[in-house]
Image (cartoon, grey):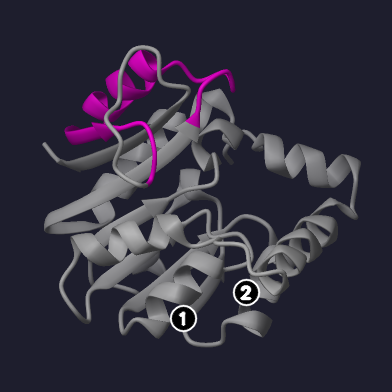
Amino acid sequence: MAEPSKWVQMTQANPDHSTWYIERFRAMAAAGADLVGEARLIDAMIPRGARVLDAGCGPGRHGGYLAEAGHEVVGVDVDPVLIAAAKEDFPGPTWLVGDLAELDLPARGITEGFDAILCAGNVMTFLAPSTRRETLRRMARHLRAGGRAAIGFGAGRGYDVADFLSDAHDAGLAPDLLLSTWDLRPYTEDSDFLVALLRQA
């Protein structure tokens, strides 16, 4: 059993947190906010009809967008309340409750690898530190040959970029490109956000 993530601890402490989170983003979407920039980057990286894993999918806005764009999407999140919202709001993809630190989709009947993995929303920084490297290793195992993972998170959240890149290396992932935003601005030592495009090493 993997160490519980910070998100699991938050929802255990406040059972209403997930519902608040869902309604917050539903309200932002209704107000016309742009909530799918991350998904647009993935869409630009992959061929039509690609397979995408939305790792830490939350209530499904990115996976829903990518499914609407014609991709085959599987979304996984540890929070069953968020997965229920994803199924309600975006019925196209396959939505699964699961811990990314124990990700094993072939054991759940999903045997094909993925052209891309999207891990947005600071998911990596919500993981328990003891599970970060294993989560990255399991992501690497789910990529098809030539596939890439796009992982983004903010600085100051307890996961140093150098430590992340070291963990990724040990997990069998190598950086293709490091960015500071989802709209493709370069990463520098002063950047307060990282978007790492990684491939199997």
Residue 116 shows in the view: yes
Residue at position x 54%, y 39% from top? 122
In the image, what residue type sits under mark 1?
Pro
76 sits to left or right of 135: right
Give the image quarter of residue 85: bottom right
Residue 14 belongs to the span the image colors magenta: no
* Pointers 1 and 2 in contact (C-beta within 8 Å): yes
Q: Position of residue 164 (x, y in %)?
A: 37, 23
Residue at position x 43%, y 53% from top? 103
Q: Position of residue 123 (x, y in %)?
A: 54, 42
Residue 159 belongs to the span the image colors magenta: yes
Give the image quarter of residue 40: bottom left
The foreground one among 179 and 115 is 179
Mark 2 surroundings: few (<14), some (14-19) or many (≥20) residues within 10 A: many
19 sits to left or right of 25: right
Residue at position x 89%, y 52% from top? 15
Q: Residue furthest front?
A: 32
75 sits to left or right of 144: right
Give me the C-alpha separation between circle 1 and circle 2. Answer: 9 Å
Give the residue pinned by disc 1.
93
- The quadrant of the rendering that contains the C terminus is top left
* Region of the chain picked out in magenta, as a range: 154-182
Residue at position x 80%, y 39% from top? 10
Give the residue pinned by disc 2.
86
Q: Which mark is residue 40?
A: none
In the image, what residue type sits under mark 2?
Ala
Residue 172 shows in the view: no
Q: Earlier in the sequence, mark 1 or mark 2?
A: 2
Mark 2: which secondary structure?
helix
| 103 shown above or below 112 | above
